[in-house]
Image (cartoon, grey):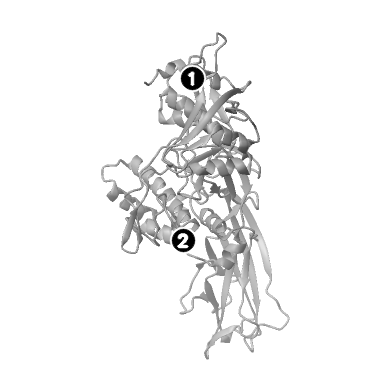
Amino acid sequence: MKKNIIKLITVFFVSMLFAFGVDALSRPVNDAARVPSRIPEPGSKLYATVQDVFDFSKIKFKNGNEEISGYDSMRKIVFSEGFEFDDQNGVFGVKDDWFTAYCLDGRLKYPENGFYFNQITGNTDVDSVVEDMIKTAILNQSNSSQAMYDLLKQARGSLGLKVLYKKPQKPDGTEMTNDELGTQMLRSSETPIEIEVEGLVIVDNKTNPRITAEELNNAAGTTGTTFKISVSSSVKDSNIIFNRYTTNSLDTTLNYNRALWMIEHSYPTLSLEDSLTAAGADYDNLKIEIKALHNTATDEEITKLIENYVYSTVQYAIWKVNDGVDYNGKTLGNELVGSEELNKLYKYLIEDKGNTFYATYGNSAYTEELSLVKPNTKKEIYEETNDIYKYGPYKVNGGFLETGKIYLSVKDSDKNGVKLVDKEGNTISELNSGEEFYVLTNKKSKIANVTIEASAPDAKIFTPTGNRGRIYYANSVITQNVITGGKIETKAVNANFELLFNPSTGVENVGMLFIVTLIAFTIGYLVLNHKNQPVEL
């Protein structure tokens, strides 16, 4: 029989668990994804939960003749290095520096345990809330030993994990009710309370449905007829309010490096629109497609749906390259059905760049400058007629996370007949990093040198430099590990490239090297749109 939750919150709460009327605390229930304002150092402890569920089932993934529907209960994972408690209004909330992560294994559970999760989902069943807090405390110490990890690993993929526990006694010798026990656990911020666990039941495991107290004690290196777990609601080290995670540097496996590349080249590392543009997709076209899928949604709802759809597409791309399957273990194909713009994003992210690229990607260094790639010496002339020399191909490479458009011009416009052209001879003034171009000169003008001015006003860099992605390892063995990228800023870069030619032979003068001069750079603001801009610490 369900009990009145108000009994549980006699001391702490003045409203029910699902109260949301507190402006002082950050409760990111339906907010847009965002990156960390600074990446937590390896070894940092974090609190994790999930946002509200959203439906992605209108999108399908084609695998041969089979179309696999997207998950109808997608979530965004929320991380914070701390949480806060408002004892006047009776609610918990994460700190304002919260950020969003992506799952690495769709088959494992989201971090949806603990008191905060029950609070945001409106669970007012005191029995289930108390049991969930005790279960969270146990799972949050899964990684305390290899033996404990191996023991609790049996519960992965189960439909439920039920905790059998003894209710502590009150001073008068009678047994506490769950109302009283829950209140005591929430009072445990200064003095932890010890709970005696008699065992765990893995609900749908017919082979080995029960983990005994003896097995738990053996795994923990303790003894007794019950397994004693200390629970604490301390803001510094709570093990019952949230799932707990530990930060680690990025692993060097190919799959993790691929996942790192994807999140560093998509939303929310890049703004939502920049993420689509990088993939050759268009925001306005995507808006039309989402409206067609949700024809009764308001403009405000469409904006939120677009954000959720883009986040989900990136998530599925990570699942595709990391495990190749969705949350049900179904193999994901290489094509997304239901939105052509999202399909462009999906294909862009899952495109295989080869093991050689991914093997070193996580450790790759960005030069944060523009460089010129020239043809081999004495092979500068690509084409020659009676009137012109056509030199090339040349390339301008950007040593940035994203270089954006590179704009080119020839210095000193009085140098008659000098043009920058593509392979077909069309005059150009902009290109992408690594795209080829050619220098066209008039033989009669006897051009001896050409100075090319290049600018990349929207190059993206990590800030601080090298502030790359992190993996967050779940303390709970049944909960999956996740990954985030780093914070970026815009850097505007200008560079001059001087090409010195022999006007008689056309080839570059021997011993004369091109000179690259970094003219200037400015640091702009975060490339994330204002809505998704992280709060500085």
Disc 2: which residue:
350
Determine if residue 413 is in view.
no
Determine if residue 423 is in view.
yes
Q: Residue at x 34, y 59 (%)?
A: 340
Disc 1: which residue:
89
Residue 407, above or below 211: below
Q: Residue at x 46, y 79 (%)?
A: 424
Q: Residue 23: percent from the left, percent from the top?
A: 48, 26
Tell whether 90 sits left or right of 415: left
Binning the other alpha carbons within 10 Å of mark 2 as few (below 14), some (14 to 19) or many (20 upward) gives many
Residue 347, above or below 306: below
Count of numbered badges drawn on the protein: 2
Q: Quadrant of residue 510?
A: bottom right
Foreground of the two, 450 or 78: 78
Tell whether 167 sits left or right of 370: left
Binning the other alpha carbons within 10 Å of mark 1 as few (below 14), some (14 to 19) or many (20 upward) gives some
The three-letter code of the residue at mark 1 reads Asn
